[in-house]
Structure formats: C-alpha cells, structure tokens
Amino acid sequence: MDDSSQIVIPDSFIALYQSAPGRKPSLPRLELTARYELCEDLATMLVDQAQTLQFKDDLPEDIVLDRCLRGLQAATDTVTGDEAVWVVRRTAELLNWSWAPKMDSPPAPAGEAPDSGLV
C-alpha cells in the first residue's frame, strides 16, 4: 500500500495520533492506515457480538458497550487504550446506539481478565 491508497481515515481516528489538532500524526501514513483498518474491522466484528450479548443477557446498550471496552482494554497487544475507546464508539455508531465511556472505571489490571462477556 502506498500514499495513493483510497482508504479515507476519519479525522476522529487521525486525532488519536496527533499531539494537537492540525499537527502531523505521529505514525507514518502506511502504519496509520493499517491501525485504522484493524480498528474498523474490530468495530465491525463487535456489532454481532454486541447484539448477541444484548439479546442473550437482556442488557442495556451502554452496559454491553462498556463490556466491549473492558475486553478491548485487556487486549493490550492488539489495540491501545485510545484505539479501544475509538473502536467501541465506532461500534456504537454502527449499531445506532449512544454511548459515552465511563471515565471512572479504570481498565482491568494487567493479567486480570475482565468480565467482558465477549468470549
């Protein structure tokens, strides 16, 4: 892939890698594109899992999305914390659900599996 890639990376994702609005992202375009594609794919895959979890356990949308976030935060080798929040926001957007991350709940400590409900 080169700079002529036709993939449009949303500003909301680019902002994850900018030190300030309008600044150049800290990742090269190729790497930024790869990170975006991974996160977009994760969001798309979470749509079915979130709907299943909501239906199976009769949970409110925000609880389902919070569990998705905790699961992604536990996967530190896959996505960063900021990317995890972006993925869940994108999942909510794809589902037409509203969601705002709860900032008072820290990620699960390293080595401790959260109750994500996504296994």
Image (cartoon, rainbow, N blue to C red):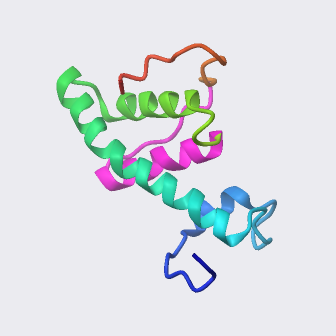
Residue 7 location (% of width, % of height): 50, 76
Quarter-wise, where is residue 58 in the image?
A: top left
Position of the C terminus by quadrant: top left
Of residues 60 and 45, which is closer to you in this image? 45
Q: Please, which residue is most extreme toward the front here?
A: 1
Residue name at image x 18 percent, y 24 percent: 56
The magenta segment: 81-104
Q: Is residue 100 magenta?
A: yes
Q: Please, which residue is most extreme toward the top here?
A: 112
Residue 45 location (% of width, % of height): 34, 46
Position of the N terminus by quadrant: bottom right
Residue name at image x 31 percent, y 45 percent: 47
Quarter-wise, where is residue 25 in the image?
A: bottom right
Of residues 1 and 102, which is closer to you in this image? 1
Q: Please, which residue is most extreme toward the bottom here?
A: 4
Q: Is residue 1 above or below residue 64?
A: below
Q: Is residue 85 magenta?
A: yes
Left or right: where does residue 107 sit relative to residue 46?
Answer: right
Q: Is residue 93 above or below residue 21?
A: above
Residue name at image x 51 percent, y 27 percent: 70
Residue 6 location (% of width, % of height): 49, 82
Q: Is residue 26 above or below residue 70?
A: below
Residue 22 location (% of width, % of height): 76, 73
